[in-house]
Amino acid sequence: MAKTRIKAKLRKGVVTVKTLSKHPMLSYVEAKRAKKEANFITYFVAEVNDKVVFEVSTSQFLSKDPYLKFAFTGAEKGDKVKITWKDLKGATVVSTGKIK
């Protein structure tokens, strides 16, 4: 079903992560108009070596197929970034990517 594309690059000690998640992100207004049930990503977390490096609670303000970018320190090339998000209906998607 859904998947998250991850690009993570280490440069001068800072890892920059770019993510693109496949999700329709139907807000309450759009869902009512389309006569469907509202559904959007409500929680997003990124972990490296079992440490949380980015965490956010979201709402219906994100657009379809949301793109997120964030940076952190304390990782090395070859470490894996694990992205987990959960939507309003309770579906959970986990994706991983390697830091280059």
Image (cartoon, helix red, strand yellow):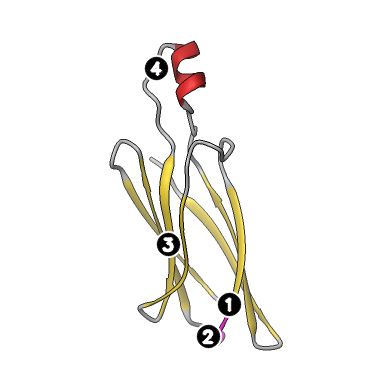
Dot 1 or dot 3: first in sequence order is 3
The residue at the point 44 percent across, 37 percent down is 40
The residue at the point 48 percent across, 81 percent down is 79
Lateral position of residue 77 relative to residue 84, left or right: right
Looking at the rendered structure, the secondary structure element under dot 4 is: loop
What is the quadrant of the C terminus in the image? bottom right
Q: Position of residue 3 (x, y in %)?
A: 45, 48
Looking at the rendered structure, the secondary structure element under dot 3 is: strand
The reply to whether callout 2 and callout 1 are in contact (CB within 8 Å) is yes
Answer with the quarter of the image where residue 16 lies. bottom right
**Residue at mark 3 to residue at mark 2: CA–CA distance:** 16 Å
Lateral position of residue 91 relative to residue 15, left or right: left
Dot 4 or dot 3: first in sequence order is 4
Q: Amino acid at mark 4?
A: Lys
- Count residues near mark 3 (Cα–Cα under 10 Å), then give few for <14, some for 14-19, many for 20+: some
Query: Is 7 in the magenta?
Result: no
**Residue at mark 1 to residue at mark 3: CA–CA distance:** 13 Å
Please give the range of residues in magenta.
72-77
* Above/below status of 23 relative to 55: above
Query: On the image, numbered disc 2 is attached to which residue?
Result: 75
The reply to whether callout 3 and callout 2 are in contact (CB within 8 Å) is no
The residue at the point 56 percent across, 76 percent down is 99
Query: On the image, numbered disc 1 is attached to which residue?
Result: 72
Q: Nearer the viewer, residue 39 or 6?
A: 39
Query: On the image, numbered disc 4 is attached to which residue?
Result: 36
Predominant SS of the magenta segment? loop
